[in-house]
Amino acid sequence: MSAEVEKIVMPPVPALVVAIDGPSGSGKGTIAHRLATLLGFQVLDSGSLYRLLALAAQQHGVSFDNEAALEVLAAHLDVQFQQGSNGDAVIILEGEQVTNEIRTEEMGRSASLVAALPAVRAALLQRQHAFREQPGLVADGRDMGTVVFPDACLKFFLTATAEARAERRYRQLLEKGFSASLPALVDDIRARDDRDINRAVAPLKPADDAIVLDSTHLGIDDVMARVRREVEQIAVLNRHLKVS
Ligand code: C5P
């Protein structure tokens, strides 16, 4: 009797994910981009999806508490992420360039309203998973390590006091030529934190296995150095690190 050799088909290995979560203004967007460049990975800026949905809702006259209509809008969101000539992301919504339009404080506030709705989060989940491509992904958001990519091989939770984060935002806005009020920004950040932390679904919180980095007294280069040291400890990530 000849022994039958069974052919074992191995499932494809999912791409590596580094999750970077934290409240607004904690520096996670900058760190995510720098780390992605170092590793040669894609980036997912998940907050931009909630901002895009809020903008689409505004343009279609859908109110921010109409969960059923927002769910449909989220499922059919016509958005493209392109790369501009300087390497920066260019975001197109329904054929229109909206890269800067979605970055306003008002759009951040509106995003946090639509992001609190369970049907909206469920409708955007698949779209976020689609960013997971070889060789890997750096995912930036509020629930990357807890809900969207719980199997991420490394998770960070960046934080800082509301005052420190408002101050950073204030300086960024002035640099870009916008006017801003620091006390209003502190209030805004506190209100957004409150909504993100206390919502029923996917609240903002560190995953149990996340490395928490408080950047209140650290510059962005110090935070990046800490992140890099952690990445070096994970063999599957370390081999992607570009020498710099
Ligand atoms: O990160 P960003 O400030 O662009 O996010 C805008 C808003 O989108 C957040 O205040 C939060 O309410 C929501 N958001 C979320 N989950 C994510 C990313 C962003 O709920 N993963």
Image: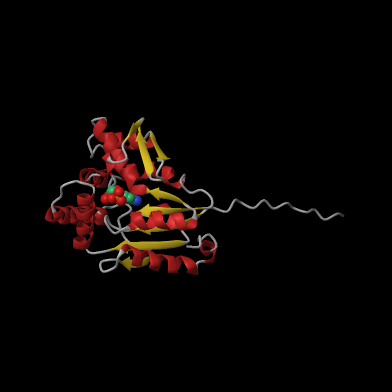
Give the percent coordinates (x, y) of residue 118: 32, 45
Between 51 and 118, which is closer to the camera in this rendering?
51
Report the colour scheme: secondary structure
Give the percent coordinates (x, y) of residue 232: 48, 67
Q: Left or right of 234: which side holds 63?
A: left
- Up/down of 214 relative to 6, above or below: below
Between 219 and 203, which is closer to the camera in this rendering?
219
The image quarter in which residue 155 lies = bottom left
Between 152 and 104, which is closer to the camera in this rendering?
104
Residue 146 seen from this side: no
- Up/down of 87 relative to 21, above or below: above
Between 102 and 11, which is closer to the camera in this rendering?
102
Give the percent coordinates (x, y) of residue 238: 52, 64
Q: Left or right of 183: which side holds 226?
A: right
- Up/down of 99 relative to 137, above or below: above
Residue occupying image coordinates x 23% and y 51%: 175
Residue 25 seen from this side: yes
Considering the image in quadrants, where does the N terminus appear? Answer: bottom right
Give the percent coordinates (x, y) of residue 177: 20, 46
The image quarter in which residue 127 lies = top left
Residue occupying image coordinates x 33% and y 53%: 202
Residue occupying image coordinates x 64% and y 53%: 10
